[in-house]
Image: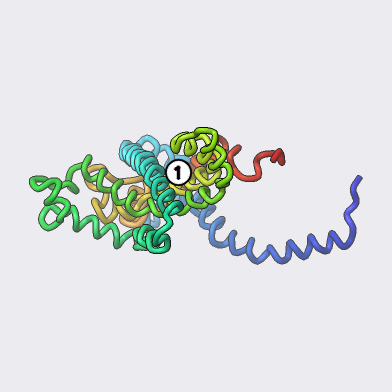
Amino acid sequence: MKTVTDGKKAERRLGLWLCAPAALVMVAVTAYPIIYSVWLSLQRYDLRFPAEREFVGIENYVTVLTNSYWWSAFGVTTLITVISVAIELVLGMALALVMHRTLVARGLIRTVALIPYGIVTVVAAFSWRYAWDDNTGYLAQLFAPDAAPLTQRASALGIIILAEVWKTVPFMALLLMAGLALVPEDLLKAASMDGAGPWQRFTKVMLPVMKPAILVALLFRTLDAFRIFDNIFVLTSGAQQTGSVSMQTYNNLIRGLNLGIGSTMSVLIFIAVAAIAFLFVKVFGAAAPGNDGGKR
């Protein structure tokens, strides 16, 4: 049986003491709000009627999960997430390849490509809103002169997705560029000498090596896209059934002052985000760095 020396025990105690402040801060800023939200979600608590506050168990969850507005918002959120992340992956990969391979004015190209990501989301959303305004918007005049795109569901969702893609493609490209840096040039040259074309080198050599970076990029963007709020809030305010689950939560929690239902929605979003992260790690976890069992 392995015995732990006194010196090792002292090191462990010192490690615990050093980690304690950070752990306490983490508990204060993350764990406590989550636990408090779960507690509020089990109560009927409307700030307009504070005297009627009472413990109702899972009644709020039943109310939300049997409500068509919640599922409509969930469908819109899922649609925006799937389409925007898929487009961002393709465009982000293309942009990453350009930034990685370019030899002339590399710094300038990377700076220009990252500008959209540096703009505050609300500011960018207002720019898109003015551009698609049916009276003064130059994009509305160009593509739909006789219509009001932001007042129709399909076109409004398309504009929301467009705003999301425009804003976050540089972020996706940045993450994928880290993966491109892992691809050995010798491996690409060897594949080229064996007769592999550009497409074969990309699919058979680069993508397998980049798999961990692609997983991280997809995970980050999927979790972020599922919590979409800013663009919808500015562009449509959730009108024409374009509201996301975050918009529904905001409407109940902030506008409606219904802490019970709003907290229930917050907890459901937290569970959905945790489930997405779990699925990603479970399905693609073998591609993550360090999961090769030390075979390499």
Instruction: Give the residue pinned by disc 1.
Output: 268
Model colouring:
rainbow
The tally of labels here is: 1
Residue at (59, 60) in percent of width and height: 26
Q: Amino acid at mark 1?
A: Leu
- Image quarter in which the C terminus is found: top right
Direction from residue 267 to residue 249 in the image, left or right: left
x, y percentage for residue 217?
Answer: 48, 47
Residue at (28, 57) in percent of width and height: 125
Q: Which structural element holds mark 1? A: helix
Depth check, front residue: 60 or 149: 149
Residue 70 lies in quadrant: top left
Residue at the front extreme of this rendering: 193
Depth check, front residue: 271 or 281: 281
Direction from residue 130 to residue 197 in the image, left or right: right
82 is higher (above) or lower (below) than 107: above
x, y percentage for residue 75?
Answer: 34, 37
Q: Is residue 80 visible?
A: yes
Q: Residues within 10 Å of mark 1 (few under 14, many from 20)?
A: some
Direction from residue 130 to residue 195 in the image, left or right: right
Q: Is residue 44 visible?
A: no
Residue at the left extreme of this rendering: 146
x, y percentage for residue 195?
Answer: 50, 33
Residue at (46, 52) in percent of width and height: 100
- Image quarter in which the N terminus is found: top right
x, y percentage for residue 264?
Answer: 43, 46
Depth check, front residue: 53 or 195: 195
Residue at (90, 48) in percent of width and height: 2
36 is higher (above) or lower (below) than 292: below
